Amino acid sequence: MEIADSRGARRMPSPFAWNGIKWGYRNGKKGGDLMDCLEKHRVKLPDGISLPSLGQGTWNMGEKPHCEKEEVKALQIGLELGMKLIDTAEMYADGNAERVVGQAIRGRREDVFLVSKVYPHNAGHSKIISACENSLRRLGTDHLDLYLLHWRGRVPLAETIEGMEKLREAGKIARWGVSNFDVADMKELWNNPGGQNCATNQVLYHLGSRGIDFDLLPWQEEQGVPLMAYSPLAQGGSLRKQLLSDPIVLQLANQYNATPLQIALAWTIRTPYVLAIPKAVQEHHVKLNAEAACIELTAEDLEKLDRVFPKPQRKVPLDII
Ligand SMILES: NC(=O)c1ccc[n+]([C@@H]2O[C@H](COP(=O)([O-])OP(=O)(O)OC[C@H]3O[C@@H](n4cnc5c(N)ncnc54)[C@H](OP(=O)(O)O)[C@@H]3O)[C@@H](O)[C@H]2O)c1
């Protein structure tokens, strides 16, 4: 089996990244190799590199020193299970989440697709280079695979594009993208010189929050720009409760011998245009998340879910947390 590395080159898998972990699927009937499930679920970025459609988030990591060991371990288990994309940001724990990621990837950088994000107020000419260099230092690496503008601020898009392209030319980032951009922002980006080099848009997306199914997701599909879904497990609050207690979700969970959140995750990565980045520190959560790639929802399942969590029929403002 060949995989594409962080800079797009083809190479044979390392023993770490593809160590053949067999994670027997719990209902027996579907038993099989988790790696194969993640291999089947891949998302292609515009430059041709393809990634397993499940990665790992890191928001709230690095906040408490006594939790860091567990956080590092969780990320490493996720990598071993094939969730090679790690998403972080200079914002998370004031840079400490990047330090945690740095510990997790030490000695195995080439097995990771590393994503970080720049604050909007650091995304102008004068600051973006040093913001990126600070992230690289905290992460203990010399390059990011993807650098995202965390959300849109006051800095003109043209300036951010220029800064991103400079970082790319200098080899500090392999590609760049945006986050929390709605359709109008994406169209404006597209109309800026170089704006179409954007590799992805990271936005909130899960079964209980599917406003983007109306316009943003179809637009991105048309442009060949995959979406990165954040908070795919609905993090907390009432939306998650609704997902956990819905009778159809419960029925499907029972049918697939899965948890309701695994059904939600399988739903999020049902198309080849969406990659999801669940965050998990508890080991069993990491494993459950990777396992969700083995759940193949049928057209009938999706129809049932559409009935209880319908696709919107009109424009809905982008959900942001
Ligand atoms: N671009 C942006 O503006 C933006 C905004 C928000 C998030 N993000 C990114 O997206 C990532 C994911 O989003 P998120 O952290 O908001 O929320 P999430 O992934 O939807 O949910 C994380 C929560 O779910 C728990 N969990 C994980 N796996 C589980 C499972 N299988 N069963 C039950 N509970 C499970 C985690 O607990 P434990 O940790 O205790 O295991 C944690 O409390 C973030 O970490 C971050 O990297 C980006």
Image: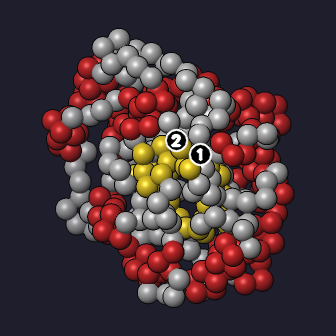
- Identify the mark at residue 11; answer none if there is no mark: 1
**From this viewpoint, is residue 316 visible?**
no
Residue 56's place in the image compared with 73, above or below, is below
- Identify the mark at residue 2; answer none if there is no mark: 2
- For the residue carrying disc 2, how many other residues have a C-alpha within 10 Å: few (<14), some (14-19), or many (20+)? few
- For the residue carrying disc 1, how many other residues have a C-alpha within 10 Å: few (<14), some (14-19), or many (20+)? few
Left or right for 118, reference 192: right
Residue 85's place in the image compared with 173, above or below, is above
Q: Are marks 2 and 1 in contact (CB under 8 Å)?
A: yes
Left or right for 220, reference 130: left
Label 2 residue SS: loop
Q: Amino acid at mark 2?
A: Glu
Q: Position of residue 124 (x, y in %)?
A: 70, 81
Left or right for 196, reference 284: left
Residue 109's place in the image compared with 115, above or below, is above
Label 1 residue SS: strand
Q: Nearer the viewer, residue 313 or 190?
A: 190
Residue under the image location 69 percent in, 46 percent down = 110
Q: Nearer the viewer, residue 293 or 99?
A: 293
